[in-house]
Amino acid sequence: MTIGTPDAVNQAAEPTPAPGSTRHSVADDSAAHHARAQDETQWWRSAVVYQIYPRSFADSNGDGVGDLQGIIDHLDHLVALGVDAVWLSPAYRSPMADNGYDISDYRDIDPIFGDLATMDRLIAEMHARGLRLVMDLVVNHTSDQHAWFRDALTGPDAEHRDWYIWRDPRPGATAHDAGPGQWRGDEPNGWVSAFSGPAWAWDEASGQYYLHIFAPGQPDLNWENPKVRQAVYTMMNWWLARGVDGFRMDVINLISKPAWGPDDAGPAMNACSVGPRLHDFLAEMNREVMATSDKVLMTVGEMPSVTLDEAADVSGRDRHELNMVFQFEHVWLDNGPDGDKYRPVPLRLADMKANMARWAGLCETGWNSLYLGNHDQPRFVSRWGDEAHREQSSTAWAAMLHAHPGTPFIYQGDELGMTDAHFGSIDQYRDVETLGYWHRAVDLDGRDPDEVMAGVRYISRDNARTPVQWTAGDNAGFTTGTPWLAVNPNYAEINAQTQVGVPGSVFEFHAALCRLRHELPVLTDGSIELLDADHPRLWWVRRRLDGVTLDAVANMSSDPLAVAEASEPVPEGRVVLTNHPGQEVTDTLAPWEVRWTLS
């Protein structure tokens, strides 16, 4: 079966209307889309966002750590890619216990990244290129080096004591000496932190514990205190006045803590997800910050463990809370027993397809984000693709992600097809979560180091944090010094220098995805249908809008796939995207082949 002749890869094309069709042309649709794009209340719906993890993006001064000037130096890379906005992971002043997600001063830039003057220059340079900046907002917790927490440590009567969550030891329990991050025995309850060990840290001076859902150096803020909330809103407005265009809000669903008792146990992150006053707090934030801005902001809330209904409440168009959410269900599908991501199980494609189709329903009343990789996930081509078919499998996954409704996010380096580093020793890792897991599993529980290392290599967050590979030169062109985290050895093969402007490259494929997102309203506003939902290798998504149909079809495996295996004939039409350019369209999908067809 021949379904048409493919255009050159990365070219968006307009199809000939089907015989008898009364629909208006795709050109008309594009004009309507352009009009919508000018509506500032909708800009983030048709946008593509690029995430920058600053310490790993580009180093301008040779100290081995990426910085703001390095980002400025590479902004034209983002223009060539065609993204609309940048989500910048934290560059605030921080002791870097969690690589910047432990903030000690919300109104300053850490010296390793630059200073406020450089930040202002970055914002100006981005705006001059038509790019918007979305800042990471980390307000569930601060660093233990923040002035607020340092004051809180001076005693129960300190001005900022109630800005954090303090509790007495559990009545009737006996404590024993224990090292940092280990159980003393009289913690207020049995909540476990996200980075292993108790979620409570002991303060010897006051004889109380403070709550930290993450590392001990990340004490949780007490959002029940209105002074905390007002301080956060004032800080957000301060950044908006400097030109920021929105916020990505780190674990924002955890800010409202539930009632709990001494017998409560288990992951603190699960217990505190979507607490009783979350919607009150987000609505108040919207009134105090977003609604007072003279421009439309993009707001996205990272919300692990959130349900579809809860996400609809947060992002609902009539709710006035946030624009969209980051949910985690699809990146947890390969977690092992009891949700242990370091003991992964094989991903079932049918589960991924069903999950993404279900979450697409969020866009009917709210909005969803689309992502496969970020600073907390390994490289998706190594995780779910096939490095032996790296270019095809990385582009197939990207194309099927972008075929869904929502706002797509591209994590730095994924546009190049970067892979996991496959480090051989735990000594090569820097991630606090990875090292905490290793300590608990190997040092405390006595598990086989080889078994634990297999899980670490698969899922560690450091897989995504190796430096961006710009050139085939020393240190991949990332730095003239010693990189803070080892560069992936495959940088000589995989780098921007050999891909930007090169037809058929992974980079140019992603640039095509960005162009199509802007040119085809069906991708933003169209209905969605999942076909052959149970097929273990075929992924087929159909989008429809105003008489235009887009069929995104992919073979998500390393073996050829006969198109006849589909439950119905693939519609004839014009192939506007393929990762097999220049090849005749046949009845067989090659390994990891993807086709987008318009009819």
Image (tube, rainbow, N blue to C red):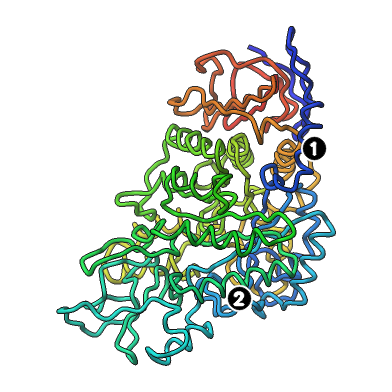
- 381 or 48, nearer to the observer: 48
Q: Of tags 2 and 1, which is closer to the observer?
A: 1
Instruction: Identify which residue is drawn at 73% across, 77% down.
Output: 116
Residue 159 vertical placement versus 471 (above, below): below
Horizontal relation, residue 331 to residue 406: left or right? left
Instruction: Identify which residue is drawn at 56% across, 62% down.
Output: 285
Q: Residues within 10 Å of mark 1 (few under 14, many from 20)?
A: few
Instruction: Identify which residue is drawn at 63% across, 15% down.
Output: 571
Label 1 residue SS: helix
Task: Name the image quarter holding the N terminus.
Answer: top right
Which tag, 2 or 1, sits closer to the chain's start?
Answer: 1
Horizontal relation, residue 515 to residue 564: left or right? right
Q: Which residue is mark 2?
A: 106
Residue 565 vertical placement versus 530 (above, below): above
Q: Which residue is most to the left?
A: 172
The amino acid type of the residue labelled 1 equals Ala
Residue 471 image point, x, y percent: 74, 58
Which quadrant of the view contains residue 351?
top left
Instruction: Identify which residue is drawn at 64% across, 41% down.
Output: 391
Q: Residues within 10 Å of mark 2 (few under 14, many from 20)?
A: many
* Disc marking residue 35: 1
Q: Is residue 198 visible?
A: yes
The amino acid type of the residue labelled 2 equals Tyr
